[in-house]
Amino acid sequence: MNIKSFCCIIFGITVLIISLPVSGGEKRQAGNAVYVGKDMIRNYHPTPALKIDTHPIERPRFPVVDIHTHFGMDVDPGLLIKKMDELGVKRIVNLSGGWGDKLSDLIEKFYRPHPDRIVIFCNIDFSQIDDPNFTKNVETYMEEAHALGVKGVKVFKKLGLTYRDKTDKLISIDDIRLDPVWAAAGRLGMPVLIHSGDPVAFFTPVDKNNERWMQLKRHPDWGYYGKDVPNRSELLAQRNRVIARHPKTKFIGAHVGCSADDLKAVENALEKYPNLYVDIAGRVSELGRVPYSSRRFLIRFQDRILFGTDRYPGRPKQPRYKIYYRFLETDDEYFDYYDHPFPPNGDWKIYGVFLPDDVLKKVYYLNAETLLGG
């Protein structure tokens, strides 16, 4: 059964349509389609008939520090700075610093000419965990990176899900062999931005009840249901044990602590671990659909929330800055959280949380500058 015939069976619901290449390398395309009886409309995106105020935001009310960006050597630093200026972004953190020559090259190309605008976080080579000199080597590496201007450490979600040691055992986030990494970060004043786990939908069956069905069909490797990996609760528990063991190290939970769909869990973690912060990168889609809870959350923990996009200024594909500004600054209702042909996460709208100026300043830049050292 091909994709088209499969979709035609399901009447009256929104489904993913994929046009498979038929000749000459035609690209696969994805979008919404709605079937009612024999009628079908593709790329369905109805325009609301609601008569409501709209307040698109071109520039933020206050300067922005984006704590969560990713880019490589192919980006033009001059264009990057130009776009930062246009978007009101005073400083960005590139979390994809890597190690070795990659880290050195990024420092030379981006940090050296723009030390007040572009910050680099390094990454850890966890494949070396079995080396007898791992502790000594990682401490030396982090000290040298810090001396070169590296401000922090980024840990990708592969830790706990993918990385394995020489016995082919998954390396857990709280593996005691990694304690020197977290301790060194604390000693050097380098915050650790850590991505552990993913949305709940990524750990559940990809079926009619999964609200991210479209996203997971486009990115099947993002789903963990049925795979030989720890469940989401265990991954977060591993992370929390590390945070508890290293109270002198500042940790930043990426993507609202990877629990934007469960703000109570984030609140509990923030209450329990005073050295934990969270960024909002890639999760305005979640926060914006529960604006009352999100507003209370952002105001209550205003000193521990950091602005982030998981993009970078000038990125041509799926920009986010202006939507994030609108979410944080306005009380606009029922608007798209994306600027794409179809919903990247789930098929819903969001609402603004109109933060007070004193809170907005902290989220936009003050909290990040405190962690980064000005």
Image (spheres, helix red, strand yellow):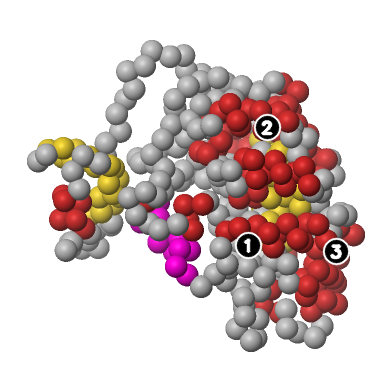
Q: Earlier in the sequence, mark 1 or mark 3?
A: 3
In the visual, does 59 lie left or right of 116? Answer: left
- Tell me the distance, in whole angstroms, between the alpha carbons under discs 3 and 2: 29 Å
Report x, y in % for residue 210.
39, 50
Q: Quadrant of the N terminus?
A: bottom left
Nearer mark to the viewer, of 1 and 2 = 1
Location of mark 3 (residue): 183
The kind of residue on which mark 3 rests is Ala
Can residue 365 be seen here? The reply is no
Can residue 303 be seen here? The reply is yes
Nearer mark to the viewer, of 1 and 3 = 1
Asked whether the beta carbons under mark 3 and mark 2 sit within 8 Å of each other, the answer is no
Quadrant of residue 123 in the image? bottom right
Vertical position of residue 51 compared to residue 146: above or below: above
Q: Which residues are magenta?
A: 214-227
The one nearer the camera, 274 or 65, is: 274
Name the outermost residue toward the left.
Answer: 38
